Image: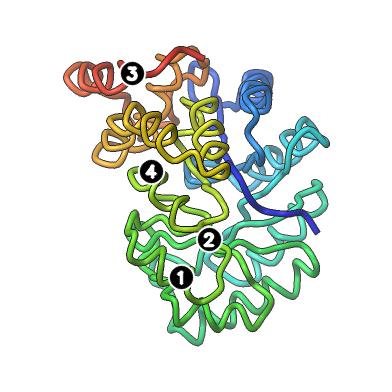
């Protein structure tokens, strides 16, 4: 069973200039950049990978090409969420066929079910995944369903031990840790504090833009070098606050491009940053080095 810890990047999906097609070569090149920077786990089709704007065929193709390209150089996680349990189970099986060492799963979203329905959903997912770890994905601001510590305690009984929590709420992180959960923080502005609190790492969109800094931050915290980690975090924090208060995926891609990456623009209807926002982002990135 693959160990889930460290820095996991929900890697950007790169499109061609029209936005109609995935640029597979550029996507693989970006994956290479992440691995060369020491990122521990590559996540395909995460939120920062714009999964909501991909067809099912595109998602499965990305799992295939990214999983094959990562190989044994890093861990490989696939995001397999769907609103219906049937489709989610099919997605899990397809991800495993592509070599996924773990899968991430939202609760059923939009007009989702009761808590009983959520538990039913995850029970079927856990069964389909078998010995492959399932990471529950909590982002209630987008999914309209909160995986509370009480709900996670029920998921733990099914063998689901990991959760990505993207509320950016340090109280919630610590509540989840109290349940025995292996928490991966997903809230950019509290990454440092969450790791100090005891999370096993981060699933973190900003890593696309600053992979070296993210890995260094994790390494310093893990080694107990908190003063050095704090100093690094102070340089990283302005960008994290920008990402969290602006249109997220366009901000991540703009920052990645600005710091030396080549990930292009988001698929429409996501709009590129305007001039004022871009100027603010430039200031937020001032303390960071190009990739």
Quarter location, residue 81: bottom right
- Per the model, the C-alpha gap separating discs 4 and 2 is 14 Å
Q: Which mark is residue 176?
A: 1
Left/right of residue 159 with respect to residue 193 in the rendered view: right
Quarter location, residue 245: top left
Q: Which mark is residue 188?
A: 4
Quarter location, residue 23: top right
Question: Which image quarter is the N terminus in?
Answer: bottom right
What's the residue at 34%, 59% (across, down)?
170
What's the residue at 41%, 75% (across, down)?
148
Report the residue that reaches farthest toward the bottom.
116
Q: How is the image coloured?
A: rainbow
Compared with 247, 195 (above or below) is: below
Q: Earlier in the sequence, mark 4 or mark 2?
A: 2
Q: Which mark is residue 183?
A: 2
Callout 2: SS: strand
Callout 4: SS: helix
Callout 3: SS: loop
Q: Are marks 1 and 2 in contact (CB under 8 Å)?
A: yes
Q: Which mark is residue 16?
A: none
Report the residue that reaches farthest toward the left.
276
Q: Which mark is residue 287?
A: 3
Q: Are marks 4 and 3 in contact (CB under 8 Å)?
A: no
Compared with 207, 145 (above or below) is: below
Residue 130 image point, x, y percent: 79, 70
Q: Earlier in the sequence, mark 4 or mark 3?
A: 4
């Amino acid at each position: 069973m693959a160990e889930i810890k460290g820095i996991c990047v929900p890697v950007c999906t790169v499109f061609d200039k029209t936005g109609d097609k995935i640029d597979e070569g550029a996507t693989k090149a970006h994956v290479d950049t992440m691995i060369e920077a020491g990122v521990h786990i590559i996540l395909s089709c995460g939120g920062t990978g714009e999964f909501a704007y991909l067809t099912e065929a595109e998602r499965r193709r990305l799992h295939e090409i990214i999983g094959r390209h990562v190989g044994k150089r890093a861990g490989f996680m696939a995001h397999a969420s769907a609103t219906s349990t049937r489709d989610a189970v099919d997605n899990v099986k397809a991800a495993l066929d592509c070599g996924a060492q773990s899968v991430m799963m939202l609760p059923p979203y939009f007009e989702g079910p009761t808590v009983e329905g959520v538990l039913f959903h995850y029970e079927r997912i856990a069964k389909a995944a078998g010995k492959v770890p399932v990471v529950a994905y909590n982002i209630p601001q987008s999914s309209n369903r909160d995986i509370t510590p009480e709900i996670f305690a029920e998921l733990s009984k099914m063998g689901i031990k990991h959760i990505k929590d993207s509320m950016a709420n340090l109280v919630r992180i610590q509540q989840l840790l109290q349940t025995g959960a292996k928490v991966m923080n997903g809230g950019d502005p509290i990454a440092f504090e969450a790791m100090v609190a005891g999370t096993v790492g981060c699933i973190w969109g900003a890593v696309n833009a600053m992979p070296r800094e993210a890995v260094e931050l994790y390494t310093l915290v893990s080694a107990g070098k908190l003063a050095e980690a704090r100093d690094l975090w102070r340089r990283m924090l302005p960008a994290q606050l920008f990402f969290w208060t602006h249109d997220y995926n366009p901000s991540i891609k703009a920052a990645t491009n600005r710091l030396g990456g080549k990930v292009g623009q988001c698929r429409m209807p996501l709009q590129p940053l305007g001039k004022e926002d871009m100027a603010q982002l430039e200031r937020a990135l001032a303390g960071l080095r190009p990739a």
